[in-house]
Image (cartoon, grey):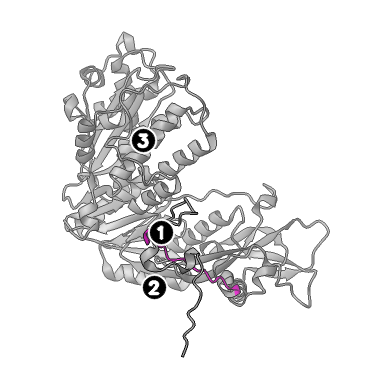
Amino acid sequence: MQVILPTIHNTSDHVPNSQCNKPVSRDPIVTRSHHNIFKRKKIFAATKHDLQENLEPSTITQSLKIAHWRDACSAEFNALMNNGTWTLVPRQTHTKLVGCKWLFRIKRNPDGSVARYKARLVTKGFTQTPGLDFKETFAPVVKPQTIKVVLTIALGHGWTLHQMDVNNAFLQGKLSEDVYMQQPPGFIHSKFPHHICKLKKAIYGLRQAPRAWHDSLKKFVIYVGFSTSLSDPSLFIYNKQGVRAFLLVHVDDLLLTGNNTSFLGQFMTELSTKFSLKQLGFPHYFLGIDFIPLKSGLLLSQHGYIRELLYKFNMYGAKATKNPLCMTTPFKLNDGSAPTDLKLFRSIIGALQYITLTRPDLSFAMNKLSQFMHQPTEVHFQQLKRVLRYLKFIINHGLKLTKHVHLKLQAYTDADWGSKYDDKTLTSAYIIYFGGNLVSWMSKRPKTVARSSTEAEYRSAANSSAEIMWLSNLLGELGFLSQFPTLFWDNIGTTYLCSNPVFHSRMKHIALDYHFVKQQVQNGKLIVSHISTKDQLADILTKPLHRTRFSLLRDKIGVLDGDPILRGHNR
C-alpha cells in the first residue's frame, strides 16, 4: 500500500516548531513569533444587547425603545405623579412656559457592574425669568468649621453619630411662585395633549428648587422643636429638658448627633414619615469625605477623591515629592515663561480647592496659585503639577480628630510681610484648635499693604480674632461655653500693641476695624501670648518651607498618615 504524504509548502504557517526559531532567508524581518513569543488575541463579541446595557441614551426616543430604560422612565414619572408634583391645566396666551428634558445615567457598583438605570426629568432652568418665575434661589449649607466643631463635641462626650440621605430631596419642596412646565416628552396625556403642567412642588433644574427644599425641611425641623443657629443657618439645635441634639444639613445629606439615643431614634422616625430618606447609620462617607473610626477618635480622609484627580489629570504615574511648593522658585505674574493652557490650569485649581476641607497643608499653595488663574504661565503650571505630585506622596493622609475632654479654643496667627514680588502685599494665616482638634484655618492675601512687620501681624491677628469670636458664639449656642480663647503669635511688637491702650503714631493709618483685637483683649474676652517662631504652627500657611520643616509642622497641626489605618491597623 502506497502512502501519499501531504505536500509541505514553504510558508511560515507550516514550519515545524523546531524550525520556528530560525528566520526564513527570504524574509529578513524577525518577528516575535519566530522566538515563540505569542500574545493571546482578545475577541470582543459586542452584541446589540451588550451595547444597550452599557450606553446611556441621549434622547427619550432612544430610551423608550429599550426595556430597562423604558422601565426607568416609567418609575420616575410614577414617582412624580405620586408626589403630586404638578397638575394639568389649559395653557393661557400670557403663560410663560418652562421646558423640560430627560437625563439618563447608569449607576454602577464599586466593581463596575450595573447597579441600576436612572432616568430623571429636569427642567430647563436657564429659560426662567428672575422676578417672574422665581424670587429667591439661595439655600445655605453647613460650614466645614461647624462640622468639625460638632464632631469634636460628639467625640469628646461619646455621642452616637447618624447619617441620613433624603431621596429626591428637591421634589419635596413646595413652590410659592406659579411655574408652568410643558408635559414630559414621551409621556403626553392622551386626553389633554395640549395642556401644560402647573408645578405644585419643586423639580430638579428649577432655579428655586434648593431654596424650596431647605425651607420645607426647616419648617418641619422647627415644628419638632429644633431652633436655627444664628451663627450657621444650616445648623439646627435641640436643647430641652436635658436633651441635646444637633442636626447638620448640607442639601440632602443630614448628620445627627446628641446625648439621648431614644430621642434621636424618635426624631429620625418622624423625619422619615415626612420625607423619604435612607438611614445610613454611622457616617462612613459624608460630603465626599471618608469618616474612618479610630480607637482614639476619627480620621477624615479624601484619599479616594485624590486618587481620581491623579488619574483624571494623568499624574498618577508622576514622581512623588515631599513638599507642595519649591522654595527657590519665585511667584511672579510676569516670570518670562510662555503662557499655559488657561482652561486646564483653572480646572486643576478648582478640583484641588475641595481637598483643603481636610488638608490645611495645601491652603498656602492654593492661595498662591489661585492668584495667577487669569494669566498662568509654564512656571505656574509646573508648580501646580508639583502639588499633584505631593498629593501622590501623601495620598492616604487625613485630618485626625481625637477624643479630648477639655473644650478650649486656641489659635495661632502669622503673616509673611512683603513676600509678593508684584505688589508687596502680605500673606495672612491662622490656625484654630478646639478641644485639641484643628477646626478652622485660613491662608489669605489681604487687599491692603502693610508698612511694617508689626502692622502685618496686627492685621492678621484681627482676622484671627474675628474667626475666634464667631466660634465662641457658635459654642455658646451649642451650650458649650469655652474658656477664654488664647491667641499665639511670634511678633513681640504686636503683643505690646494689643495690650497698649494708647494708639501709637505709626498705627494711626490703620482702619478702626483692625483694632477689634485690642478691644477684645481689653474686655477680657481674648488672651494674647507670644511664642517662638519655631513653635508657630501657622507658619506652614504663609510661605514655602523646606521639606523637613514642612513635614514637622504638617504632623503637628494634625494631618497624619492614614495608610496603616486603611490597611486595617487601627490606632
Residue labelled with disc 2? 269
Mark 2 and mark 3 lie on one chain; the one further toward the N terminus is 2
Of residues 308 and 98, which is closer to you in this image? 308
Which of the numbered marks, if any, corresponds to residue 34?
1
In this rendering, position of residue 152 left or right of residue 387: left
**Residue 327 lies in the magenta stretch:** no
**Residue 40 lies in the magenta stretch:** yes
Of circles 2 and 1, the one toward us is: 1
Of circles 3 and 1, the one toward us is: 1
Mark 3 and mark 1 lie on one chain; the one further toward the N terminus is 1
Q: Position of residue 423 (x, y in %)?
A: 43, 17
Residue labelled with disc 3? 386
Point 62% across, 61% down: residue: 122
Q: Position of residue 185 (x, y in %)?
A: 71, 67
Looking at the picture, does residue 32 appear above or below residue 64? above
Inter-mark Cα distance, 3 to 1: 45 Å
**Dominant secondary structure, magenta:** loop
Q: Which residues are magenta?
A: 33-48
The amino acid at mark 3 is Arg
Helix, strand, or loop for circle 1?
Answer: helix
In this rendering, position of residue 203 left or right of residue 376: right
